[in-house]
Amino acid sequence: SAAEKGGYDYFMLKEIAEQPKAVADTLLGRIDASGSLTLDEVRIPASVLREVDKVVLVACGTAYHAGMIAKLAIEHWTRIPCETELASEFRYRDPILDQRTLVIAISQSGETMDTLMAVRHAREQGAKVLAICNTNGSTIPRESDAVLYTHAGPEVAVASTKAFLTQLVACYLVALYLGQVRGTKWGDEIRAVIRELSDIAAAVDTVLETMEPVRALARSLAEKNTVLFLGRHVGYPVALEGALKLKELAYMHAEGFAAGELKHGPIALIEKDLPVVVVVPSPRGRSVLHDKIVSNIQEIRARGARTIVIAEEGDEAVVPYADHLIRIPATPTLLQPLVATVPLQVFACELATARGNEVDQPRNLAKSVTVE
Ligand code: AGP
C-alpha cells in the first residue's frame, strides 16, 4: 500500500531515501567516545583476529560488489592478503582454506543458497566465518562463527540499495577493526577514516538532495539500448554495481569495465552518442589514478561517446570532457563508493520508470535466491 511505501511510489525510492539513516544506524554504538571501534559483538577474540593470515570474501550480486570494495580496504588497512569471490564459484574450485583464514560472507537476506553453501564449505575446511547480514536470525548468520549485522531495516525492493550501503559500512568497520586490533602502520589513517565515517551519512544526504538532474538525464536516455560504466580502484565495483542496477531494473544492456582495460578490447564498443558513465576517483587521494581516468574520458569522448561523469566537488580537470557532470561530496578515497553509488541507483530507478518497467519487482528476479 501507499502507506507502507511511506508516500513514495515505489519501495525502491523509499529505500534509496532511507540510506543516510541506514548508514548512521549501522555505525551507531560501534565507535566509542575516543574514536575507536568497539566490535565486541563480533565475538571473535582479538587474539584469533591477530593470527588471521588470509581473508576471503564470498557473496553474490550486489553483495559481491561490496566484497570487491572490502578487499581493497582490508588489504590497505591491514596488509592481510585478501580475495573476493563469487559465492557460486567458490566451493567448486577447491579453495585453500585453514584455521587462519577468515571468510567473510556478505548477504542482505542471509538466505542466499550460493552464499550459504560457501559458508558451509569454508567451515568444513576449518576456516572462521564472519557473516555480514541484514536479517536477524537468518540462516547464514546462524551457521557462521560470528555476525556483524547491518542495520538497514527491511529491504523490500528486489534491487538492493540501502543494504548495499550498509554492507559497505560493515565492511569498512571490519577492515578498520582488523587494522586497529593488529596495530598496522596505518594507525593514524585508520583513526582519521573512523572520524570521516561518522560524517558520511550527511554526505549521502547531500547527494540525495541533488538528484533531479540525474533523473532528467535518465529520462532522456530511455530509448537507448546500451550504457557502459567505467571505474578504477573502488570505482570499478561501483561501475559494476551501476551496470547491474540498470540490467535488473531497466532491462538494458549495461556493462561495467575497469577503465584501464578499455584499450584491451572494450573501447571497440564506443560509438557516436553511446552513453558512458565514468566514476572518477578523488584528485586529492591517488592523483595518478585520477589523471589516468581523465585521459580515459578524453579517449572515449574523442570517439564520440556521450560522457556522464561522476566526480568529486571541486574537481575541475574533468569539466572540459564531461557532457553531463554529476557532483559528489569529497570523501577519503576508499569511502567514495558510499556516495558514488547513489546517483547510479537513482539513474537506474528513473530509467526503469521511464521505460514502463515494474520497479520493485523486476521480471525473472526474486528478492532472495534460495536455490543454487
Ligand atoms: C541486487 O540488486 C540483487 N537483487 C542481487 O544481486 C542480490 O544482491 C544478491 O542476490 C545477493 O542477495 P543477498 O545479499 O540477500 O545474499
Image: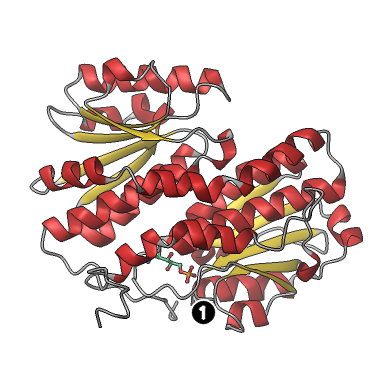
Residue 58 on image: x %, y %? 58, 61
- Identify whether 247 is placed above or below 270: below
Residue drawn 60% across and 49% down? Answer: 70
Is residue 83 found left or right of 353 in the rendered image? right
Looking at the rendered structure, the kind of residue marked 1 is: Glu
User: Which quadrant would the N terminus be assigned to in this image?
Assistant: bottom left
Image quarter for ligand 1 equals bottom left
**Residue position marked by numbered label 1 in the rendering:** 111
Cβ of mark 1 under 8 Å from ligand 1: the answer is yes
Question: Is the image coloured rainbow, by chain, by secondary structure, or in one colour?
Answer: secondary structure
Residue 323 on image: x %, y %? 21, 26
Let me know if residue 86 appears in the view: no
Foreground residue among 196 and 114: 196
Question: Which SS class for mark 1?
Answer: loop
Let me know if residue 115 appears in the view: yes
- The quarter of the picture where residue 314 lies is top left
User: Which quadrant would the C terminus be assigned to in this image?
Assistant: bottom left
Is residue 129 found left or right of 117 in the rendered image? right
Tally the marks.
1
Foreground residue among 219 and 129: 219
Is residue 3 found left or right of 141 in the rendered image? left
Residue drawn 57% across and 34% down? Answer: 333
For the view shown, which residue lies furthest in the right direction?
Answer: 47
- Identify whether 33 is placed above or below 370: above
Residue drawn 60% across and 77% down? Answer: 140
Residue 242 on image: x %, y %? 35, 48
Residue 80 on image: x %, y %? 76, 45
For the view shown, which residue lies furthest in the left direction?
Answer: 223
Foreground residue among 357 and 16: 16
Residue drawn 27% across and 71% down? Answer: 7
